[in-house]
Image (cartoon, rainbow, N blue to C red):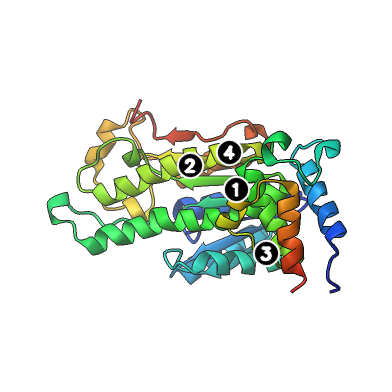
Amino acid sequence: MPEEKAKGCALVTGASRGIGAATARLLAAEGWPVGINYRSDQEGAERVVGEIEEAGGRAFALRADVADPSAADELFTSLEEHFGPVLVLVNNAGVRDDGLSPQLKDDAWNRVIETNLSAAFRTTRRALRPMMRERFGRVVNIASIVGQRANPGQANYAASKAGLIAFTHTVAAEVARRSVTVNAVAPGLVETELTEDIGDEMLKAIPARRAGTPEEVAACVRFLVSDDASYVNGTTLTVDGGLTA
Amino acid sequence: MAAATKEQIEERMTEALVSFGAERDDVKRDADWESLDVDSLDLVELAQIVEEEYGVKMKEEDMKEMKTVGDAVDFVAERADQ
Protein backbone atom coordinates (compact mmCIF):
# COMPACT_ATOMS: atom_id res chain seq x y z
CA MET A 1 0.00 0.00 0.00
CA PRO A 2 1.33 3.47 -0.81
CA GLU A 3 2.64 5.35 2.19
CA GLU A 4 0.21 8.22 2.65
CA LYS A 5 1.43 11.82 2.71
CA ALA A 6 1.30 13.42 6.15
CA LYS A 7 -1.25 16.02 5.20
CA GLY A 8 -2.88 17.28 2.10
CA CYS A 9 -3.81 15.89 -1.25
CA ALA A 10 -3.50 16.27 -4.99
CA LEU A 11 -6.02 17.56 -7.51
CA VAL A 12 -5.79 16.55 -11.15
CA THR A 13 -8.15 18.32 -13.54
CA GLY A 14 -9.44 16.39 -16.53
CA ALA A 15 -8.46 13.12 -14.89
CA SER A 16 -11.07 10.71 -16.25
CA ARG A 17 -8.80 9.57 -19.10
CA GLY A 18 -5.53 10.08 -20.93
CA ILE A 19 -2.67 11.97 -19.35
CA GLY A 20 -4.82 13.13 -16.43
CA ALA A 21 -5.88 9.60 -15.49
CA ALA A 22 -2.31 8.27 -15.79
CA THR A 23 -1.06 11.16 -13.62
CA ALA A 24 -3.71 10.56 -10.98
CA ARG A 25 -2.75 6.87 -10.78
CA LEU A 26 0.96 7.64 -10.40
CA LEU A 27 0.41 10.33 -7.77
CA ALA A 28 -1.85 7.99 -5.81
CA ALA A 29 0.87 5.34 -5.96
CA GLU A 30 3.20 7.93 -4.43
CA GLY A 31 0.84 8.22 -1.49
CA TRP A 32 -1.20 11.27 -2.43
CA PRO A 33 -4.95 11.11 -1.93
CA VAL A 34 -6.16 12.38 -5.31
CA GLY A 35 -9.17 14.38 -6.45
CA ILE A 36 -10.22 13.14 -9.88
CA ASN A 37 -11.87 16.04 -11.64
CA TYR A 38 -13.97 15.33 -14.72
CA ARG A 39 -16.48 17.27 -16.79
CA SER A 40 -18.59 14.67 -18.60
CA ASP A 41 -16.97 11.23 -18.39
CA GLN A 42 -18.27 10.08 -15.02
CA GLU A 43 -17.71 6.44 -15.91
CA GLY A 44 -14.06 7.10 -16.74
CA ALA A 45 -13.54 9.06 -13.53
CA GLU A 46 -15.10 6.31 -11.43
CA ARG A 47 -12.94 3.75 -13.19
CA VAL A 48 -9.81 5.72 -12.24
CA VAL A 49 -11.01 5.99 -8.64
CA GLY A 50 -11.62 2.22 -8.63
CA GLU A 51 -8.15 1.46 -9.98
CA ILE A 52 -6.52 3.68 -7.38
CA GLU A 53 -8.51 2.17 -4.53
CA GLU A 54 -7.74 -1.33 -5.73
CA ALA A 55 -4.04 -0.47 -5.55
CA GLY A 56 -4.50 0.70 -1.95
CA GLY A 57 -4.68 4.43 -2.62
CA ARG A 58 -7.36 7.01 -1.99
CA ALA A 59 -9.25 8.95 -4.61
CA PHE A 60 -12.46 10.88 -5.03
CA ALA A 61 -14.24 11.90 -8.24
CA LEU A 62 -15.35 15.52 -8.58
CA ARG A 63 -17.53 16.74 -11.42
CA ALA A 64 -16.89 20.30 -12.59
CA ASP A 65 -16.33 22.15 -15.83
CA VAL A 66 -13.18 24.09 -15.01
CA ALA A 67 -14.10 26.67 -17.66
CA ASP A 68 -16.87 27.75 -15.29
CA PRO A 69 -15.44 30.61 -13.18
CA SER A 70 -17.01 29.27 -9.99
CA ALA A 71 -15.62 25.75 -10.49
CA ALA A 72 -12.23 26.29 -8.85
CA ASP A 73 -13.59 27.29 -5.49
CA GLU A 74 -16.19 24.53 -5.48
CA LEU A 75 -13.61 21.91 -6.42
CA PHE A 76 -11.12 22.98 -3.78
CA THR A 77 -13.67 23.38 -1.02
CA SER A 78 -15.08 19.95 -1.68
CA LEU A 79 -11.67 18.31 -1.86
CA GLU A 80 -10.43 20.10 1.27
CA GLU A 81 -13.35 18.62 3.20
CA HIS A 82 -12.45 15.13 2.01
CA PHE A 83 -8.68 15.05 2.04
CA GLY A 84 -7.36 18.30 3.57
CA PRO A 85 -5.43 21.06 1.80
CA VAL A 86 -4.56 20.66 -1.85
CA LEU A 87 -0.76 20.66 -1.94
CA VAL A 88 -0.41 19.31 -5.46
CA LEU A 89 -2.33 20.77 -8.38
CA VAL A 90 -2.05 19.35 -11.88
CA ASN A 91 -3.76 21.57 -14.44
CA ASN A 92 -4.40 19.01 -17.12
CA ALA A 93 -7.93 19.67 -18.38
CA GLY A 94 -7.70 20.75 -21.98
CA VAL A 95 -9.73 20.97 -25.16
CA ARG A 96 -9.01 21.40 -28.86
CA ASP A 97 -11.15 23.19 -31.40
CA ASP A 98 -9.00 23.38 -34.51
CA GLY A 99 -9.30 25.58 -37.56
CA LEU A 100 -7.11 27.77 -39.71
CA SER A 101 -6.90 31.28 -38.33
CA PRO A 102 -8.81 33.03 -41.15
CA GLN A 103 -11.78 30.82 -40.33
CA LEU A 104 -11.42 30.43 -36.60
CA LYS A 105 -14.61 31.48 -34.84
CA ASP A 106 -14.70 33.51 -31.64
CA ASP A 107 -16.43 30.62 -29.90
CA ALA A 108 -13.61 28.23 -30.77
CA TRP A 109 -11.02 30.75 -29.67
CA ASN A 110 -12.73 31.57 -26.39
CA ARG A 111 -13.60 28.02 -25.44
CA VAL A 112 -10.01 26.84 -25.81
CA ILE A 113 -8.50 29.84 -24.01
CA GLU A 114 -11.03 29.57 -21.18
CA THR A 115 -10.50 25.87 -20.53
CA ASN A 116 -6.78 25.57 -21.21
CA LEU A 117 -5.53 28.87 -19.81
CA SER A 118 -8.03 30.87 -17.75
CA ALA A 119 -9.18 27.81 -15.81
CA ALA A 120 -5.58 26.98 -14.91
CA PHE A 121 -5.14 30.53 -13.66
CA ARG A 122 -8.23 30.26 -11.44
CA THR A 123 -7.33 26.87 -9.95
CA THR A 124 -3.75 28.01 -9.37
CA ARG A 125 -4.89 31.23 -7.70
CA ARG A 126 -7.15 29.23 -5.41
CA ALA A 127 -4.37 26.74 -4.64
CA LEU A 128 -1.51 29.12 -3.88
CA ARG A 129 -2.52 30.66 -0.57
CA PRO A 130 -2.90 27.34 1.28
CA MET A 131 0.34 26.12 -0.34
CA MET A 132 2.17 29.25 0.78
CA ARG A 133 0.87 28.76 4.31
CA GLU A 134 2.05 25.14 4.29
CA ARG A 135 5.45 26.19 2.92
CA PHE A 136 5.00 23.43 0.37
CA GLY A 137 3.20 23.19 -2.90
CA ARG A 138 3.49 21.77 -6.37
CA VAL A 139 1.69 23.11 -9.40
CA VAL A 140 2.24 21.31 -12.69
CA ASN A 141 0.66 22.71 -15.83
CA ILE A 142 0.21 20.38 -18.76
CA ALA A 143 1.22 22.49 -21.74
CA SER A 144 2.18 21.25 -25.20
CA ILE A 145 5.04 21.55 -27.65
CA VAL A 146 2.49 23.43 -29.75
CA GLY A 147 2.97 26.25 -27.24
CA GLN A 148 6.59 26.44 -28.36
CA ARG A 149 6.47 25.85 -32.11
CA ALA A 150 4.00 26.16 -34.95
CA ASN A 151 1.23 23.70 -35.70
CA PRO A 152 -1.05 25.12 -38.40
CA GLY A 153 -4.72 24.82 -37.53
CA GLN A 154 -4.17 25.23 -33.80
CA ALA A 155 -3.70 28.96 -33.28
CA ASN A 156 -6.11 28.95 -30.34
CA TYR A 157 -4.65 25.83 -28.75
CA ALA A 158 -1.08 27.09 -29.32
CA ALA A 159 -1.87 30.48 -27.80
CA SER A 160 -3.46 28.83 -24.76
CA LYS A 161 -0.46 26.55 -24.21
CA ALA A 162 2.13 29.30 -24.79
CA GLY A 163 0.17 31.41 -22.32
CA LEU A 164 0.22 28.56 -19.85
CA ILE A 165 4.01 28.29 -20.13
CA ALA A 166 4.48 32.04 -19.60
CA PHE A 167 2.05 31.92 -16.69
CA THR A 168 4.08 29.06 -15.20
CA HIS A 169 7.33 31.04 -15.32
CA THR A 170 5.90 34.13 -13.68
CA VAL A 171 3.96 32.42 -10.90
CA ALA A 172 7.01 30.29 -10.08
CA ALA A 173 9.08 33.42 -9.54
CA GLU A 174 6.37 34.93 -7.34
CA VAL A 175 6.03 32.05 -4.89
CA ALA A 176 9.39 30.25 -4.98
CA ARG A 177 10.47 31.55 -1.59
CA ARG A 178 7.56 29.74 0.03
CA SER A 179 8.91 26.41 -1.27
CA VAL A 180 6.12 26.25 -3.80
CA THR A 181 7.16 25.14 -7.27
CA VAL A 182 5.28 25.80 -10.48
CA ASN A 183 6.40 23.92 -13.57
CA ALA A 184 5.03 22.85 -16.91
CA VAL A 185 5.24 19.65 -18.89
CA ALA A 186 5.07 20.00 -22.66
CA PRO A 187 4.08 16.73 -24.31
CA GLY A 188 4.49 16.11 -28.00
CA LEU A 189 2.27 13.58 -29.71
CA VAL A 190 0.73 11.35 -27.06
CA GLU A 191 -1.77 8.54 -27.65
CA THR A 192 -4.98 9.91 -26.16
CA GLU A 193 -8.51 10.58 -27.32
CA LEU A 194 -7.49 14.18 -27.92
CA THR A 195 -5.00 13.11 -30.58
CA GLU A 196 -6.67 10.04 -32.09
CA ASP A 197 -7.50 11.87 -35.34
CA ILE A 198 -3.88 12.85 -35.99
CA GLY A 199 -2.48 10.74 -38.80
CA ASP A 200 0.52 8.43 -38.91
CA GLU A 201 2.24 10.99 -41.15
CA MET A 202 3.34 12.88 -38.08
CA LEU A 203 5.12 9.84 -36.66
CA LYS A 204 7.78 10.14 -39.37
CA ALA A 205 8.74 13.55 -38.00
CA ILE A 206 9.30 12.17 -34.51
CA PRO A 207 12.85 10.86 -33.92
CA ALA A 208 11.47 8.15 -31.61
CA ARG A 209 9.17 7.02 -34.48
CA ARG A 210 6.24 6.57 -32.15
CA ALA A 211 3.73 8.51 -30.12
CA GLY A 212 4.30 8.81 -26.40
CA THR A 213 2.05 7.18 -23.81
CA PRO A 214 0.08 8.99 -21.11
CA GLU A 215 2.23 7.14 -18.55
CA GLU A 216 5.42 8.62 -20.02
CA VAL A 217 4.01 12.11 -19.51
CA ALA A 218 2.66 11.25 -16.06
CA ALA A 219 6.13 10.08 -15.01
CA CYS A 220 7.43 13.60 -15.68
CA VAL A 221 4.66 15.05 -13.53
CA ARG A 222 5.48 12.58 -10.77
CA PHE A 223 9.09 13.77 -10.83
CA LEU A 224 8.13 17.46 -10.68
CA VAL A 225 5.83 16.74 -7.73
CA SER A 226 8.45 14.70 -5.86
CA ASP A 227 10.90 15.96 -3.24
CA ASP A 228 13.65 15.23 -5.77
CA ALA A 229 12.41 18.21 -7.80
CA SER A 230 12.37 20.69 -4.91
CA TYR A 231 14.82 23.02 -6.71
CA VAL A 232 13.20 22.72 -10.14
CA ASN A 233 11.00 25.76 -10.54
CA GLY A 234 9.50 27.71 -13.42
CA THR A 235 10.69 25.32 -16.06
CA THR A 236 9.03 23.42 -18.88
CA LEU A 237 9.88 19.77 -19.22
CA THR A 238 9.45 18.69 -22.82
CA VAL A 239 8.45 15.08 -23.39
CA ASP A 240 8.15 14.53 -27.12
CA GLY A 241 10.39 11.69 -28.29
CA GLY A 242 12.88 14.22 -29.63
CA LEU A 243 10.41 16.04 -31.91
CA THR A 244 11.58 19.52 -30.94
CA ALA A 245 15.20 18.56 -30.33
CA MET B 1 -15.69 34.56 19.73
CA ALA B 2 -14.63 37.42 21.99
CA ALA B 3 -13.20 40.41 20.15
CA ALA B 4 -9.42 40.32 20.02
CA THR B 5 -7.57 43.09 21.83
CA LYS B 6 -5.15 45.30 19.98
CA GLU B 7 -2.29 43.68 21.93
CA GLN B 8 -3.41 40.21 20.82
CA ILE B 9 -3.61 41.35 17.20
CA GLU B 10 -0.17 42.91 17.43
CA GLU B 11 1.26 39.72 18.91
CA ARG B 12 -0.31 37.57 16.18
CA MET B 13 0.94 39.86 13.42
CA THR B 14 4.39 39.93 14.96
CA GLU B 15 4.43 36.15 15.01
CA ALA B 16 3.43 36.13 11.32
CA LEU B 17 6.10 38.65 10.36
CA VAL B 18 8.74 36.65 12.23
CA SER B 19 7.64 33.56 10.31
CA PHE B 20 8.27 35.53 7.08
CA GLY B 21 11.87 36.13 8.21
CA ALA B 22 11.73 39.41 10.17
CA GLU B 23 13.80 39.68 13.36
CA ARG B 24 11.48 39.70 16.38
CA ASP B 25 13.36 42.58 18.02
CA ASP B 26 12.90 44.70 14.89
CA VAL B 27 9.12 44.25 14.75
CA LYS B 28 7.85 47.43 16.39
CA ARG B 29 4.83 49.64 15.72
CA ASP B 30 6.83 52.22 13.79
CA ALA B 31 8.87 49.69 11.78
CA ASP B 32 8.15 49.90 8.06
CA TRP B 33 7.93 46.90 5.77
CA GLU B 34 11.16 47.65 4.00
CA SER B 35 13.18 47.70 7.20
CA LEU B 36 11.71 44.29 8.07
CA ASP B 37 12.34 42.95 4.58
CA VAL B 38 8.62 42.25 4.24
CA ASP B 39 7.61 42.18 0.58
CA SER B 40 4.35 42.11 -1.34
CA LEU B 41 4.08 38.31 -1.17
CA ASP B 42 4.42 38.48 2.62
CA LEU B 43 1.64 41.06 2.75
CA VAL B 44 -0.62 38.78 0.70
CA GLU B 45 -0.04 36.05 3.25
CA LEU B 46 -0.53 38.46 6.14
CA ALA B 47 -3.87 39.48 4.61
CA GLN B 48 -4.90 35.84 4.45
CA ILE B 49 -4.04 35.27 8.13
CA VAL B 50 -5.95 38.38 9.17
CA GLU B 51 -8.99 37.38 7.15
CA GLU B 52 -9.02 33.82 8.47
CA GLU B 53 -8.42 34.71 12.09
CA TYR B 54 -10.21 38.06 12.50
CA GLY B 55 -12.60 38.12 9.56
CA VAL B 56 -11.03 41.37 8.37
CA LYS B 57 -10.48 41.78 4.65
CA MET B 58 -7.33 43.69 3.71
CA LYS B 59 -7.73 44.78 0.12
CA GLU B 60 -4.81 45.65 -2.11
CA GLU B 61 -5.62 49.35 -1.91
CA ASP B 62 -5.80 49.14 1.89
CA MET B 63 -2.40 47.47 1.99
CA LYS B 64 -0.87 50.25 -0.09
CA GLU B 65 -1.86 52.71 2.64
CA MET B 66 -0.20 50.65 5.36
CA LYS B 67 3.42 51.58 5.67
CA THR B 68 4.23 50.28 9.13
CA VAL B 69 3.38 47.47 11.53
CA GLY B 70 1.32 49.95 13.57
CA ASP B 71 -0.75 50.94 10.51
CA ALA B 72 -1.65 47.31 9.89
CA VAL B 73 -2.41 46.54 13.53
CA ASP B 74 -4.67 49.60 13.81
CA PHE B 75 -6.46 48.72 10.57
CA VAL B 76 -7.28 45.23 11.82
CA ALA B 77 -8.09 46.29 15.39
CA GLU B 78 -10.60 48.92 14.21
CA ARG B 79 -12.44 46.47 11.99
CA ALA B 80 -12.22 43.38 14.21
CA ASP B 81 -14.21 45.25 16.85
CA GLN B 82 -17.17 45.83 14.57
From the viewer's side, name the closer residue of B23 and A105: B23
Residue under disc 3 on the same chain as residue under disc 2? yes
Type of amino acid under label 1: Leu
Foreground disc of the pair 1, 4: 4
Label 4 sits on a secondary structure element that is helix
Q: Residue furthest front?
A: B30
Dot 3 or dot 2, earlier in sequence = 3
- Rounded to the nearest angstrom, the CA distance separating label 2 from label 1 is 22 Å
Residue at 33% in and 31% down: A243
- Rounded to the nearest angstrom, the CA distance separating label 3 from label 2 is 24 Å
Foreground disc of the pair 2, 1: 2
- Rounded to the nearest angstrom, the CA distance separating label 1 from label 4 is 12 Å
Label 1 sits on a secondary structure element that is helix
Residue at 45% in and 46% down: A142
| Protein chain holding label 4 | A
Label 2 sits on a secondary structure element that is helix
Image-quadrant location for residue A83 = bottom right
Determine which of the numbered discs, if any, sits on residue A224 in the image: 4
Type of amino acid under label 4: Leu
